[in-house]
Image: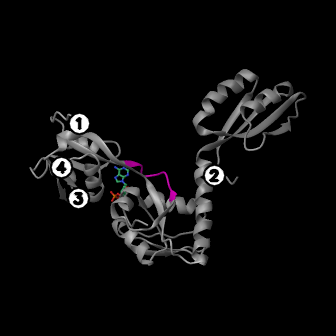
Amino acid sequence: MQKSGRLQEESVRLLREAGLDIETGKNKLKATATNLPVELFFLRDDDIPGYVSDGVADAGVIGRDVFAEQQSGNEVVSALGFARCRLSLAVPSDVVYTGVSWLDGKRIATSFPNLLNQFLVENNINAAVHLVSGSVEITTGIGLADAICDLVSTGSTLASNNLKEVQQVFASEAIMIANPAIDADRRQILDCLLFRIAAVQKAAKYRYILLNCPDVAIDAVSAIIPGMKSPTVLPLAQEGWSSLHSVVDENDFWSRIDRLKAAGAEGILVVPIEKMIL
Ligand code: AMP
């Protein structure tokens, strides 16, 4: 995984949530998990696809952008959902951008020549691609390029450099890649890790819900929060009332809560779930 940078903290957090006991230190380049036979290398993210395809590492966490740019021949084994960003074209704010044809004959600075060239070919654009390894945003201001192609998430770096985003080229997020040729024992450890990561990811999308309702409303309330199989129904000490427990999708739980109240639910509690195994 990445030694330092945007992916590092979330990558370690995800593996810890998946149950890996890892000690990290500021200048540590290697760590051994104490509870699974897994060794971690902390590397420059650009180097990770190469280490994985060479078999030095069996798997790696990188941005999909780096994976697609390098075409290292590894397989993507999981989309991790963090570090979402896009590779986009941007031009100086005062440019009247008329569409992709504006790029014809222009100079574009980027650290992603392969992804950019692929986009230019697909759009029949003839532009000069200048490879720069960093500080892409200043290249238009110093006369090196007419446009840039760089990673964007909020757009604030572009804005502070008087640039505007005009075209998305590629959508990215953190992914886990693996060497397709790893042996069966290592594949088993990787599968165990992937299973746990999926449980963490699934849990993040759902909430555990507890509520009270009159017994006569149990069917109506259960229909609104059916859960994984069916809700748990427990009698309350107060005659004629029950407690219902279930899980709800985070994306639509507000609309369900209005319906639950209308059906007679009271004392609704919604709590996070740590792991979810179906
Ligand atoms: P960095 O730490 O800046 O080298 O970026 C490492 C990876 O984080 C990139 O390969 C992208 O996948 C991702 N990334 C880069 N820029 C952003 C951004 N602005 N927002 C979110 N993720 C990003």
| Label 2 Cα crowd, 10 Å radius (few <14 / some 14-19 / many 20+) | some
Q: Which residue is mark 3?
A: 134
Q: Nearer the viewer, mark 1 or mark 2?
A: 1
Residue 59: % across, % down:
48, 69
Q: Quadrant of residue 234?
A: top right
Q: Which residue is mark 1?
A: 99
Compared to residue 107, the image places residue 18 above or below, namely: below
User: Gap in Å between the C-alphas at discs 4 and 1?
Assistant: 14 Å
Where disc 2 sits, the SS reads: loop
First reached walking from the N terminus: tag 2 or tag 3: 3
Where disc 1 sits, the SS reads: loop
Q: Decide: marks 1, 2 in contact (CB < 8 A)?
A: no
Compared to residue 255, the image places residue 132 above or below, namely: below
Q: Name which residue type carries label 3.
A: Gly
Where disc 4 sits, the SS reads: loop
First reached walking from the N terminus: tag 2 or tag 4: 4
Residue 157: % across, % down:
26, 45
